[in-house]
Amino acid sequence: MTEALLMPAAAGIPEPPAAHPRHGTAELEMSLSPAELERLRAAAEHCVAAGVVADAEEFAMRALAGTAALPAPLLEGLRAFRRYGSPVGGLLVRGCPTFDVPRTPEDPTAAVGTTLTAAGVFGIVTAVVGDQYGFEPELGGNIIQDVVPVRGFEYTQQSVSSAEELYSHVESAFTEDRPDFVALLCLRADHDRVAATTLSPVERIMPLLSRHTVEILREPRFTTTVDASFLQGLGTAEPIRVGPIRVLSGSLERPRVRADFAETTGLDGEAQEALDELRRCADEVAITVLLEPGDLLFVDNHRAFHGRTPYRARWDGADRWLLRTSVTRDLSRSEARRPFDGRIVDTDYSRGENVLRG
């Protein structure tokens, strides 16, 4: 990713290494001729006509067919990212056409973004990387969601916050059904162009951690709570804690991460100290991504933490507006929790075997 868009959050941190030729690229440009643009528009409108909310499966199937409208170099880069990931924990696709964008909605439950041609473009590009899906407690399970600032939630640890820093996290860290990738399409930047998405790739974090900390983070000595946005959908304000979990798993060189620094805690003092060290290192290596309209950012949800810097919302119809979706390489992993083999995970997180009582 270019230096203009991705800068280390802390001074003195070297730029991430260049991507290996076989391991995908960190940034791609969607360059379309007028004829290609019209072809993509038609494919995107065909997707949206299916109704993202009414028939998520038909939308996704049309999106998959619509990938034929994408230029070959873009397809190659997206497939490489799906297979190999990237050294910076994400992939930025620049120049995605958003077409007509109305006023920024104030209510994400209205699902305004699902009706836009941009949602079809979003679905088509995302289909190359994996299957879109949703969670019933979060905005009714819509597989494409509006991320906009909401009055009264400015200082919360939710995507609809604005004035508060959104702490680095793995998306839906509380569930085994968490996405492989989180995709964000920018429709409109914030007024002051200061709201930045942060990426903290595991490949840059690991060299900074002590061996003892790594050993502790690989042990089931942590707990995490169900996200507040899910609790609202479940109709409860009572915290739901799950655990014990491991924060690091897999290979020692390039592990998978599982933590939300707003929700995850250690089950003992030593575990909490290890988690605090991980957070300090994640903050130290954080890369900032200033999304502009037409930027589509994929976050590798197993190899990087992501967050967002604060900004000022005005609720004047011109606030920051992103589309978001969860993506999986293997939809069958959650089959038991998706009624009728649909695309919406629907489960009672308060009744899981890993819920910690008392």
Image (cartoon, rainbow, N blue to C red):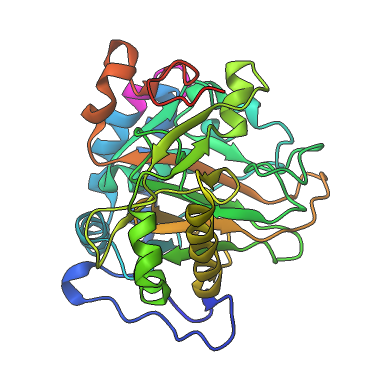
Q: Is residue 202 magenta?
A: no
Say above or below: 281 vs 274: below
Q: Residue shown at 53%/21% (left/top)? A: 140
Image position, residue 87 (x, y; %)? 32, 70
| In magenta stretch: residue 55 | yes
Range shown magenta = 53-59
* Residue 98: percent from left, percent from top: 52, 50
Query: In this picture, is 38 found above or below 64?
Result: below
Numbered circles on residues, count: 0
Q: Quadrant of residue 310?
A: bottom right
Tell me where residue 288 appears, x and y as whole percent: 55, 69
In this rendering, the answer to whether 356 lies above or below 301 is above
Pick whichever, 277 or 23, lies toward us: 277
- Near-viewer residue (270 or 60): 270
- 182 displayed left or right of 22: right
Quadrant of the rendering where the C terminus is positioned: top right
Is residue 174 in sight in this rendering? yes
User: Left or right: where does residue 250 sit relative to residue 296?
Assistant: left
Extreme-front residue of the structure: 269
